[in-house]
Image (cartoon, rainbow, N blue to C red):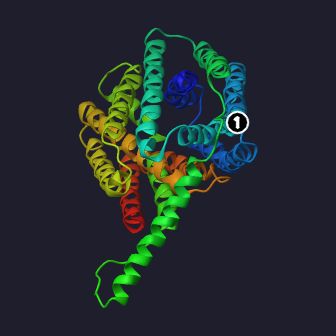
Amino acid sequence: MWRLGFFFHETAFGLLSVFLPLYVISIGGSLVEIGIMTALALFLAIPASFLWGYLCDKTRRYRRYILISFLSSAAILYLFTLPTNIGMLILLYSVLSVLHMAHEPPKNVLIAELYSREDWERSFAFYEGFTEAGWLIGLVLGFLTAAYGMVPTHTLLLCSILNLVAFVLCVILVADPLLIFERGLVSIEKSVDFASKGVFLASRIWGGTSLERRLKRENVSAFCSGLILFSLATSIMFTPMPIFINSIAEASALPSSIVFAIFVLNSGGGVAGYFIAGRLSRPEAGKANIGKVVIFRCLLAFLLIWATMTAYNVVFATTILILMGFAYAVFLVYTLSLSMEIIPAGKTGMFNVLVGIGGACGSFIGPFLAQTFGFQYVFLTSGLIFFLTYISFKIFT
């Protein structure tokens, strides 16, 4: 039940994710200005992630930061209804990004501390799938508001109200864990397991037995690099994606509301991915399959290039986006679970920092490439970076 507030929060941001780029264009903005707005917000969110992660672990109070995030989001989204100036919109969105990050590290810790390590993949998958359903409903609301011609200020006000509902529900349903020890136990278990393997190998060598096995620690730097690269490739592709989908709609003489409908299907692919990742969860599943998921997403990015050469084939592009959503969901479940093993207490926000670094860079690069060279270069660049991501995670495992 404690996840219910997060559901309404994601509903609001699902609606906002497609509405906001289209809104910026509608009031005279450009793709580059969308990139600047998104990049600035994400760059500011990087130190914020460090701060919120440190504070929640330092104080061992997680609920208060979730409440700060949702209440401030409601207030700032209400302010969005007042200005129409691009500069003011960029400023407000940057402030929103910083305060919005306050709920991310505490949410991850709540899941890690409320469940045992064996259940982390399943628990993260359930949370992400449940909130992705909220995101999907937000996209459906976007489709309906666009189809019925709701004015932009009313759409933004709806997003603000949804965050206020999320705040009230979290006041009632979310509580801090009584004991906080699961991540510490996992860290101790990993150290003991590594030492045990070392003793075993040493005893075999001293006994004169030749061994092909090697004692190997996980390459944390490669894991962090993989997260940054994956986020960079994803952001390059998806920041200008609503504009690309809108161009598909215009080329096929379809209404602009179809943009939301296509992203609903993309989100539906994500829900399916979370469900399957949860059903097939095992502690070692992430390490075994993460490279396969990344290379699959790499191939999908390259396939999108073909969509730009076939008169913006709507069905083909939509199918790829559904599969993209599925692959992203599986990747997120695996990496979140692994990050809670690798990242020590006090640095809980590191996962969001790494994702934010890639996202911030990609959110400017993507629109810039799209406006300067065309969308085929967006997808080519994204695909190449996904391939580098695959290499990073191969080194990690």
* SS category of the residue bearing label 1: helix
Which of 316/77 is in front? 77
The residue at 52%/66% (across/down) is: 191
* Vertical position of residue 203 compared to residue 309: above or below: below
Amino acid on which the number 1 mark rests in the picture: Leu
Residue density around tag 1, few if under 14, some if 14–19, many if 20 or more, within 10 Å: many
Q: Toward which corner of the image does residue 156 lie, by quadrant?
A: top right
Residue 289, located in which quarter of the rendered image?
bottom left
The image shows a total of numbered marks equal to 1
Residue 120: x and y in percent read 45, 43
Residue drawn at point x = 66 percent, y = 33 percent: 176
Q: Nearer the viewer, residue 262 or 217?
A: 217
Visible residue check, residue 139: yes
Residue linked to disc 1? 99
* Residue 366 in picture, x, y percent from top left: 48, 48
Relative side of 9 to 120, left or right: right
Residue that appears at 40% across and 53% down: 382
Residue 3 position, x and y percent, is 54, 26
The C terminus, quarter of image: bottom left
Asked whether the viewer can see residue 357, the reply is no
- Furthest-top residue in view? 148
Quadrant of residue 322 within the rendered picture: top left
91 in relation to 40, above or below:
above
293 vs 205, nearest the viewer? 205
Residue 304 image point, x, y percent: 30, 45
